[in-house]
Every structure is written in structure tokens, then in C-alpha cells.
Image (cartoon, helix red, strand yellow):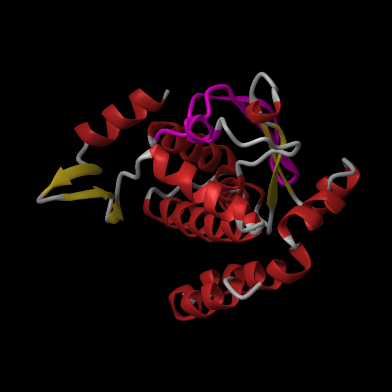
Amino acid sequence: MALGLLAKLIMTRQLRFEDGQIELKGIRMTLVPAFFVGELTRYFYDQKRLYRLYLLSWLMGFKLVGMIKEQFNLDTPSKVYNFGMDLAEAEGIGLYKTYDYMPGRYTHFVIADNPFLKYLKDVNTDEPIDYFISGGMGGGGCFVHQQLTQNIETKCILRGDAHCDFLTGTEDELKKRGLWDEVRRRYILDKIYPLQKRFYDAFFEKKEDEVLEEIIEEALKI
């Protein structure tokens, strides 16, 4: 699906590689090697501050999917989800498979061959560790479920699981599944949620660029 999306975007010149730039219908993009995300994860893991990586990725995912939704006029939750996931796969997060999906509540998907964790095989962890994908999917999921959402990785290949298992959900959904307390613990949510909410509200007021620097500065103090 990802290859078909890329081919369509290139053929219609909505995705262009020109003059040293990658542009997706007016959105400037770049290619980031997987080892960089892996080492970034290692850094925050060693610092015991993976929640910072989660928040930074959440902000990126929220902003990017919001821009894509507007630029491509994606007017239903399923269009947002399918386009966003195919684009993420095309960007190299690994092949995804959706297990279950309920707009306004949750999205459950797995990634069988996570490229970032290949650079972290020496890390011995009892907990899932891919806060980069979790953050991006939590932020982007806001436009699928039309409210502020979080994502939690429940299975991880670094723990010996067969695949990485992710759930994006609303607060109510995560509470119903008994995952909310774990989300709060992992992401220090009592401190980062106000920053997420500030950015969320600012986006719909077209003021997100005005608050982003301040939010990041505050995030790096947590």
C-alpha cells in the first residue's frame, strides 16, 4: 500500500524531489536514517527520560498529520488513518498491520519489523521502549479520533515479543482497558498533558507556531 501511495503522489507531482528538497504538497520533508532514531532512543533511555522523546514525537506527529489532513482535504477519520499509516510505512517505520479500529475510541496495530530497535539489541529492558513511534502515533491519532489521544506500546521485540504492538486511544478508552495508569506513569503525563493540550488548542487557532518553542523549552525541563 505504501508503494502505491508513493507512486501516486510522485506521478501527480504532489510529492516532489527537486533542488535538494523533498516536498509533500507544500510540506517540506526530510529523510532521517533509522540508526539516528535508534541512538536518540538510547540517549533518552540512558537518561531515564524517554517521556521527553515521546512528547517531542507526539508534537511532530500531531503537527504533521494536521497539515496533511488540511492539504489533502482528508474529510473522514478512515481517510486520515489510512493515508497517515501508509505514509509512515513509506517513511520506513516497518510494515504495519491494523488489528482493530474504532473511530473516536482507539486504533490497534502491530509493526513486525521495527527498524529503529535493530540498533538497540544490546539494551536489556522489561518494558517496551519505542517511544518514537508511540509519540508520533499518539499525536497523529488526535485527527483520527477527533480528540486528544495517547499511544502505548504493549509488546516489544526487545522483550522477546514477536512484534511491536501499539494502541492509540482516547483517555476513556485507555481507562476502560486498564492502561491509563500505565500511560500516566510512562510519560509523566500529569506534567506533559498540559503541554499537549496547549499545542492541541493552539493548532486549531492557527497559533501553534507561536507556542511550540516555549512548549519544547518547558518539556526539556521535566
Quadrant in which residue 220 is drawn: bottom right
On-image quarter of the N terminus: top left
Q: Is residue 90 above or below residue 52?
A: above
Q: Observer-nearest residue: 104 or 178? A: 178
Residue 7 screen position, x and y as percent:
27, 27
Quadrant where the C terminus lies?
Answer: bottom right
Drawn side of residue 18 relative to residue 120, left or right: left
Q: Is residue 196 above or below residue 105?
A: below
Toward the top, the furthest residue is 162
Instruction: Estimate the x, y position of residue 137 in percent, counting from the top left.
Output: 58, 45
Would you say 165 lies left or right of 30 here? right
The answer to which of 110 and 78 lies nearer the viewer is 110
114 magenta-colored: yes
The structure residue drawn at horizontal position 41% and vertical position 38%, both measured from the top left corner, is 34
Residue 156, picture quadrant: top right
User: Range of the magenta residues?
Assistant: 92-120
Could you say where residue 11 lies in the image, as x and y percent from the top left?
Answer: 20, 32
At 40% across and 27% down in the image, what residue appears?
A: 2
Closer to us: 52 or 106: 52
Percent x, y of residue 159: 70, 29
Residue 76 falls within the magenta-colored stretch = no
Q: Name, please, the residue furthest toward the left.
A: 19
Q: Is residue 147 above or below residue 214?
A: above
**How many numbered marks, from 0 up?**
0
The residue at the point 62 percent across, 74 percent down is 198
What residue is at 47 percent from the left and 77 percent from the top? Answer: 213
